[in-house]
Image (cartoon, coloured by chain):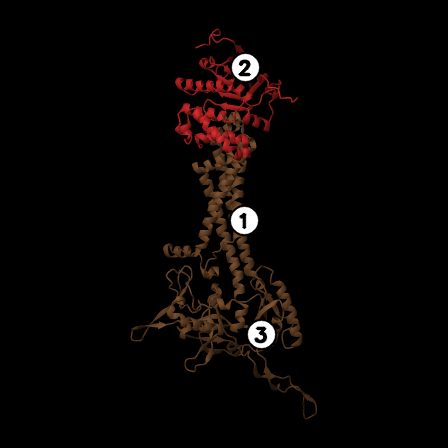
């Protein structure tokens, strides 16, 4: 029990154990911060991949496939599948009100069913909020402004249906929902919300005027897409002026900067993938010539037929949480079986061996593996660096034991055993480890939780922007501490501290009592 | 009839005790066949010049050091040979109390803690049960040595004499059967040294405490029940200090 008493006294009366604790604090904090941010990056990446695609994607790019309604009906009938939605993915040009053209990925969706498969309802940005985001202490977010509540409610509804009422006709028109970073007309504030910009326009007479460029209120954009025929050949560019219904914010900069959502029917129409009566080439029929022999040089006749609507993708959401690695594989296999039955009944769709059916993990495999490898490498490197704490504790304990040699002799003279002396120093190492790890975890938690404000402050005060969303994919730095990781780092800190104390403790235990008492 | 373990009148028997130190490649014999007995309740002073092996003898008796393997030595305490390892730890914790010349108090602990730490080392996990008994005993002991009002002080705040009083209280907290004191007054001025010696003798008289005191001071030695002198690594009994020309 003297060990507890002395440990307590040594901890509070010496500067050296504080240095050892500080080493453990720094190492545990460094590892946990790194692991939390890098691990959070991977987790966020995984989550974001599913945010806009669901768990499994059935895809036949470019030309797409027909009868998707039947496929979706079959998918929804399966107990493993919670929802499915048709999607068209294409590339195009968007022309913004200030004349800029941007290359974007255009995604045609059916709002209600897309929201069932993905987090679409959550990522719509302009909607009324009851309370501001946590960092917005002054409630400056326009979404919490009571005066804008009606507008925000209307925008939310517009976003869900991807339509906007035409003030001239009173009719709902198909509209687009671009990512919040597409237009560049929204200012991202430090506290985590967006403010629509007001542009100053220079007139010919030299005066300026303020121009409201809040697109979802009354803005329009021009979309240019390139339809492909059933052979995959480009037909002609289709240009259409479309109203903006809302904007979305997925938190993934790549998505928010490059994706424009559009009402599915509108995109099908623009890409000529809608149901329509179209002329199709028929093979040249044998024609009787003058000599009665067949003549093969006649141009093919053209027939008119109803071509069913097509989509390039069907997104599928499974029942339950499939966010862990490998969890979506059974769902993919199930989708393959369902598609095989579907293809057997529809000869005009791609065969089951041609179609691509991918899980969210397959879709993002390259990036996931890269991030995983990077996380592992960084963790290993930082863990090795943290091993310096072991040697630091060892050196400090070695010095302390030299200083306390006579005390060790005194303890042996009053009956302390070798094991008791070793236990004293190991317990002391454990105490330093506990103090260091707890403080390290607290420091890491504080830093990780506040890493975005800290980063913003560094940007403002020091001009440093370490986390560039264009490079690191996400608008915000991941800021969650996983309890199991914190526990592992905590025990790692204890291990380092006790490990560093081990050799000095053995040395202390093996000291000759008389030599220790005579030590000067 | 029930039998009781015999209480030996002789508490310590040392026979043919040899101890040699190795300095580099040279063997330096310090004790060359010590024979010594100590009776229960006796105050024995071991007198000798510096380097005569007094402290070595005390350390060997107290189980802090081990005699040479050859020739075979024999140390018996209460009729039992001193053991090794854990038994020696237990012997030091419960049967022996040490008082050192330089007090050897732990500077981070208070006076009270410096006394109770010996009981902690003895009782180990049982300390939690014993604490309510031992702490009042420690306070009483500190009262007895005149430091009842300084229990919360640190050693650095005490004078040399006060520190030695704390060391005496620490040595007595486990009610040892034998107190071993190594030059207990050697680091104190004469007046303080006398008061410490008075205290030790008072306690020895009150409790019939067996006490072996190593000293090079004839003044200290002449207050003992019996004096032995170490010469050339061997014990020489000194029946009469005056006759031996050692009286002060």
> Residue under mark 2: which chain is it in?
B
- Tell me, yes or no, whether the two marked residues, 2 and 1, touch with CB atoms within 8 Å: no
Q: Which mark is residue B145?
A: none
Q: CA distance from mark 2 to mark 3?
A: 107 Å
Q: Residue furthest right?
A: A292
Q: Position of residue A50 (x, y in %)?
A: 54, 64
Q: Position of residue B217 (x, y in %)?
A: 45, 15
Quickly name the residue at label 2: B233
Are the numbered discs 3 and 1 placed on the same chain, yes or no?
A: yes
Quickly name the residue at label 1: A488
Chain in red on the image: B
Q: Nearer the viewer, residue A205 or A166?
A: A166
Disc 1 secondary structure class: helix
Residue drawn at x 52%, y 9% is B239
Disc 3 secondary structure class: loop
Query: Which colour represents chain A?
Result: brown
Quickly name the residue at label 3: A64
Residue drawn at x 41%, y 23% is B161
Determine whether, in the image, residue A166 is placed left or right of residue A366: left
User: How many residues crowd around disc 2 within 10 Å: few (fewer than 14), some, or many (20 or more)?
Assistant: many
Which of the 4 quarters of the picture holds residue B79?
Answer: top right
* A378 up-or-down from B86: above or below: below
> Residue under mark 1: which chain is it in?
A
Q: CA distance from mark 2 to mark 1?
A: 61 Å
Q: Nearer the viewer, residue A202 or A82?
A: A82
> Residue under mark 3: which chain is it in?
A
Q: Residue furthest front?
A: B1
Q: Position of residue A214 (x, y in %)?
A: 39, 71
Residue drawn at x 55%, y 55% is A373
Q: CA distance from mark 3 to mark 1?
A: 48 Å
Q: Mark 1 or mark 3, which is nearer the start of the sequence?
A: 3
Disc 2 secondary structure class: loop
């Amino acid at each position: 029990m003297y060990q507890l008493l002395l440990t307590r006294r040594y901890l509070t009366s010496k500067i050296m154990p504080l240095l050892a604790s500080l080493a453990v604090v720094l190492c545990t904090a460094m590892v946990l911060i790194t692991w939390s941010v890098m691990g959070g990056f991977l987790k966020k990446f995984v989550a974001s991949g599913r945010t806009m695609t669901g768990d499994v994607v059935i895809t036949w790019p470019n030309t797409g496939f027909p009868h998707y309604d039947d496929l979706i009906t079959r998918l929804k009938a399966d107990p493993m599948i919670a929802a499915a939605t048709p999607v068209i993915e294409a590339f195009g040009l968007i022309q913004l009100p200030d004349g800029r053209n941007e290359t974007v990925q255009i995604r045609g969706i059916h709002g209600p069913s897309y929201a069932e498969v993905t987090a679409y309802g959550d990522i719509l940005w302009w909607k009324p909020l009851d309370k501001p985001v946590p960092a917005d202490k002054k409630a400056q977010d326009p979404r919490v402004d009571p005066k804008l509540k009606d507008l925000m409610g209307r925008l939310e509804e517009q976003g869900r249906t991807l339509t906007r009422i035409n003030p001239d006709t009173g009719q709902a028109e198909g509209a687009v929902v671009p990512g919040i970073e597409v237009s560049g007309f929204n200012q991202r504030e430090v506290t985590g919300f967006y403010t629509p910009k007001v542009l100053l326009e220079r007139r010919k007479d030299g005066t300026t005027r303020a121009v409201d460029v809040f697109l979802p209120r009354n803005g329009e954009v021009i979309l240019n897409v390139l339809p492909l025929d059933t052979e995959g050949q480009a037909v002609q560019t289709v240009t259409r002026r479309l109203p903006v219904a809302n904007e979305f914010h997925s938190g993934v900069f790549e998505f928010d900067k490059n994706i424009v959502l559009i009402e599915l029917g509108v995109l099908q129409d623009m890409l000529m993938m809608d149901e329509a009566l179209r002329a199709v080439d028929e093979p040249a029929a044998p024609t009787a010539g003058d000599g009665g022999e067949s003549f093969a040089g006649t141009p093919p006749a053209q027939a008119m037929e109803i071509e069913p609507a097509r989509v390039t993708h069907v997104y599928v959401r499974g029942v339950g949480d499939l966010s862990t690695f490998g969890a979506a594989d059974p769902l993919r296999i199930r989708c393959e079986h369902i598609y095989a039955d579907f293809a057997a009944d529809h000869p005009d769709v791609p065969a089951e061996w041609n179609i691509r059916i991918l899980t969210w993990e397959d879709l993002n495999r390259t990036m996931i593996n890269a991030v995983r490898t990077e996380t592992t490498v960084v963790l290993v490197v930082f863990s090795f660096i943290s091993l310096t704490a072991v040697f630091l504790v060892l050196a400090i304990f070695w010095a302390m034991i030299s200083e306390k040699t006579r005390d060790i002799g005194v303890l042996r003279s009053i009956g302390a055993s070798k094991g008791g002396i070793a236990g004293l120093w190991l317990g002391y190492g454990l105490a330093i480890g506990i103090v260091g790890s707890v403080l390290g975890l607290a420091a890491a938690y504080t830093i990780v939780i506040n890493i975005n404000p800290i980063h913003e402050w560094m940007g403002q005060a020091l001009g440093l922007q370490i986390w560039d969303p264009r490079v690191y994919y996400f608008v915000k730095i991941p800021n969650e501490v996983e309890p199991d990781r914190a526990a592992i780092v905590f025990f790692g800190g204890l291990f380092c501290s006790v490990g560093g104390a081990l050799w000095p403790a053995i040395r202390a235990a093996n000291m000759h009592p008389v030599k220790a008492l005579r030590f000067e | 009839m029930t039998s009781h373990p015999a209480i030996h009148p002789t508490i310590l028997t040392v026979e043919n005790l040899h101890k040699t130190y190795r300095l580099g490649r040279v063997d330096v014999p310090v004790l060359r066949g010590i024979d010594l007995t100590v009776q229960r309740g006796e105050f024995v002073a071991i007198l000798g010049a510096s380097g005569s092996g007094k402290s070595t003898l005390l350390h060997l008796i107290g189980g802090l050091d081990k005699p040479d393997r050859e020739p075979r030595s024999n140390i018996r305490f209460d009729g039992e040979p001193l053991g090794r390892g854990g038994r020696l730890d237990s012997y030091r914790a419960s049967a022996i109390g040490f008082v050192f010349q330089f007090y050897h108090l732990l500077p981070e602990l208070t006076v009270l803690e410096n006394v109770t730490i010996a009981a902690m080392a003895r009782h180990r996990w049982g300390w939690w049960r014993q604490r309510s008994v031992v702490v009042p005993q420690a306070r009483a002991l500190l009262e007895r040595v005149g430091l009842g009002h300084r229990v919360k002080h640190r050693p650095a705040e005490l004078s040399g004499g006060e520190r030695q009083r704390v060391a005496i209280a620490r040595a007595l907290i486990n009610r040892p059967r034998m107190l071993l004191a190594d030059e207990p007054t050697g680091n104190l001025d004469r007046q303080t040294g006398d008061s410490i010696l008075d205290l030790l003798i008072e306690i020895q008289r009150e409790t019939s405490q067996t006490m072996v005191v190593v000293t090079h001071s004839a003044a200290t030695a002449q207050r003992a029940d019996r004096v032995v002198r170490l010469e050339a690594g061997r014990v020489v009994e000194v029946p009469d200090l005056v006759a031996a020309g050692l009286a002060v």
